[in-house]
Image: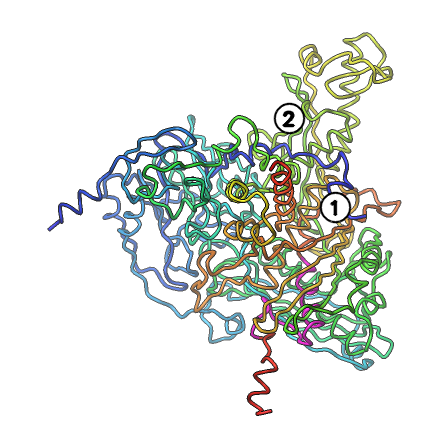
Amino acid sequence: MALTRTTSGERWRIRPDGPDKVTGKLAYLTDMYQEGMLIGRVLRSPHPHAGIVSIRTDKAKRIPGVHAVITHADVPGMNRFGIVNPDQPVLCEDRVRYIGDAIAAVAAETQEIAALALESIEVEYVLLPVVDDPAFAQTKQAPRLHPGGNVLHRNQYGHGEVGKGFAKCKHIVEESYSTPRQMHTYMETEGGLFIPEDGGRLTVYSPTQHGYKDRMQLARILGLPEFNIRVVSSPIGGSFGGKDELNVQPYGALLALVTGKPVKIHNSRYESVRAGLKRHPMKIKMRTGVDENGRIMAHQVHIVADTGAYATLGAEVLNFAIEHVTGPYTYESVEVEGVSVYTNNGVSGEFRGFGGNQAIFALEGQMDRLAEKLGMDPWEFRLANMRKPEDPGPLGQTIVRTDGAMRTWESLARSPIWLRRHDRRTSEPWIRRGTGAAIAMHGSGLGFGIPDPAGGMLALAEDGKIEAIFGYEEFGQGLIATLELMLIEQFGFGAEDVRIVIGDTDLVPHSGSSTASRATSMMWKSLQKLRGPFLDRMLNEASKLLSQPADNLRIGRGGIWDKSGEHLLLTYALLARNISEEIRFQTHFPFPVSPTKRVGAHYLYTYAAVAVEVEVNVLTGRVKVLKQFHAIAAGPVMNPQGFLGQIEGGSGMAVGFALTEDSLMERGAYLTRNLDTYLIPSYADLNGEIEVHAIEELPEDDDHGPRGVGEIGSVCIAPAISEAVFQATGKRVNKLPIDPELLQETPDFLAKAVDGI
Amino acid sequence: MINKSLAERRSDKELECEINGQPMSLEVPPTRRLLAILRDDLQLTGTKVSCEIGRCGACMVLVDGRPVNSCLTMAYQCQGKKITTIEGIGQDEVDPIQQCFLEEGGYQCGYCTPGMIVSVKALLDDNRDPGIEDIEEALSGNLCRCTGYGGIVRSVHKAVQLRRNSS
């Protein structure tokens, strides 16, 4: 059944953060203002690669209204950041490695004075050769961008012998796939307010996907104990992975501490573009062969990822891509190699899908090409090679038994889009229609060997509100709404009984990051663990107060009810006022991991099968996505509106990845600096039909509950569109975004005129 | 030498306009952007800042009922005009358009939402029965990165339906 507002019934609710969002009342952290606050700005390198000879700030410091100009000399702690591998200078000392590298920061009384101060900082550079090609970066002639060389990370996986496998093949497909430098393009650019507090504390109001991680990194940079820093990090105007790493926080924090005044920073769009993360452009070479029966005998993959100037999570993204270039299939032999290479091309990092998008585009492209060679239906070909529920995961690791691949495959095979795929009629001769499909399994959680803590807290507050307290962030995905609905459905509270507390390190426990499609899953598990003890204690306290056995009582909307549910006996406010000891329970546990010791390997997967119907205008070369069908197997749906929104939103973003989005660079400089040339999909691009089917059933022995769906909607669209374009035009796509020139045809009448017929 | 008349022209002038029904008199340079006046001078932060080149629509407001990007509008262009921001829509009770966005889930992070609602308001105030192309045109200047427009399409269609039924 399609997931819609109607089919969701009462589970489709107005989000608790909705009213303030539609009225503009919600104060984002970049909307904050404080009397007397200064404006912070960052001086960034105009060169993609240069040595710094000198930095002179005296002129800038003399400008009236300038309160501070800081350089690397003013960083009290470690002058580096990076979630896993801190190799990015907060403020560069002697060298810049990309066009957004920070050299100095200023705090001034107005925007205008701050801008003047930036212009007055004198930096002398000596230009160095620009490394803008990952292939060149790996050669001996290339300048070394980091002490360890230009390779950030190399990894591989394999089983069987591909040499022997290829020897058995009837058909072999060899292709090289390229993917774009996609930009997150959150509508709210990076920023925040940084307030020095009494007692040497600092409050940071700035979006991030993991408040505690920012706190740890800032403490390291500022040379302060973590406890002295409070990070308030929600609400957020979009992130998609892009605000996971530190961005403006170090500068705001340093300037606030140096000046002793509140400092506000809010990036302009171009500053966001030049300084911010992008999706790793990857070149993925694949050689895949099948025997005469259509069984895949050998699959050989080579991945080169352009990680840009600094690491952030580049190594982890590459590991994820290596894990996802094999997908839900079995192979007689596999050999995967990958390398993530430093260049002067901005900074690539974490982005929704996390390397899966690139890997699955390439892999599914191979599947369609092999099916064509075999003369097989592409969907049947996938079935013939599909993994079985008990099979190990893509890295040979033990995973939770799952029939998600088969269930999504079947759902798509029955979908209306797929059933009418052979009908290619269009209204005009220059319009071609085609249908394509793709399937994927996508890991959730950070993977084996990476600290991945989870947990949360439930408390009865003094005013009688039930507080659900989690260290997760709300960047639009609907986490607050999901949590509220879980508390209503699984505990029996009313929405008005509940207060959700997130995004503030002074208030919340360590819950791990809001990344990797993990937060919903971990909130559910936390509540499962907290439910028994919390409700028992509530009922026991109520039992004492009411002098009734706890067995006669039940939890309900507004308070404690008699067993029949007819009489409200005690409100939560009264209960809270009359208990002797606080009711507060906390749980802490790690995200489930595979017993197989391979770093990064996942244990829980979600599955998607996606079909799209497109129209190609062969005069303009433009592709329009008319219809989409998504079958998603991610366990029970916790919040239908949120689930649908994640699939629609993830897929919309992937339509951009496939058709229009690329942060173009030339010799390390961005050519696409704003939304006039960097084109994300608009309303008219995405108002086609979209149908989402949630496959909620899990195998009986699966007690891991709901999986997150933040990323799964974004990984199958590009290969499905590419196949649909092939069906429509007969042209194979191996490079994204699809170049309209590839699809343009000379109209018949022109050909006739030239031929003189 | 500084051209005196030019210097005078560039000095702060009294801007007389109406913002959300309230007459305002503001000392601002004629070239100050309306976006800065709203967000920085008046702390009306429901109007959002995002691309600042008139492409994303996060800063959309109504000037005499017409949708404009406040990032591209200067103070002198607002002289004597009636300006409506998101704060001026549904002041007493939620506007039916806002209600449609709430019910259909036409937002996620919410950062584009004020501008989106302003554009829909402009459309429906002007056109009681817009067709698909009218809607596409009206929302061509508003970008959303979260929803893939699914919820927005449903919200707008519902708001259009309500408008039709009310007329």
Which of B54/A147 is in front?
B54
User: Mark 1 or mark 2, which is nearer the start of the sequence?
Assistant: 2
Helix, strand or loop for disc 1: loop
Q: Tell me the SS state at disc 2.
A: strand
Say above or below: A415 vs A257. Answer: below
What is the quadrant of residue A565 in the picture?
top right
Across and down, in percent, residue A702 comes to: 84, 45
Confirm whether residue A702 shows in the render: yes
**Label ID, residue A499:** 2
Q: Residue at x 40, y 41 (%)?
A: A254
Residue A472 shows in the view: no
Instruction: From the top left corner, tell me how far across and down residue A465 is, in percent.
Output: 66, 21
Residue type of the residue flagged with mark 1: Arg
**Residue type (three-letter) at the residue carrying disc 2:** Arg
Tag 2, which chain? A
Q: Residues within 10 Å of mark 2 (few under 14, many from 20)?
A: some
| Chain where mark 1 sits | A
For disc 1, the marked residue is: A707
Instruction: Tell me, yes or no, whether the two marked residues, 2 and 1, touch with CB atoms within 8 Å.
Output: no
Distance from Cα at disc 2 to Cα at disc 1: 24 Å
Q: Percent x, y for residue A757? A: 60, 91
Which segment did they paint magenta? A715-741
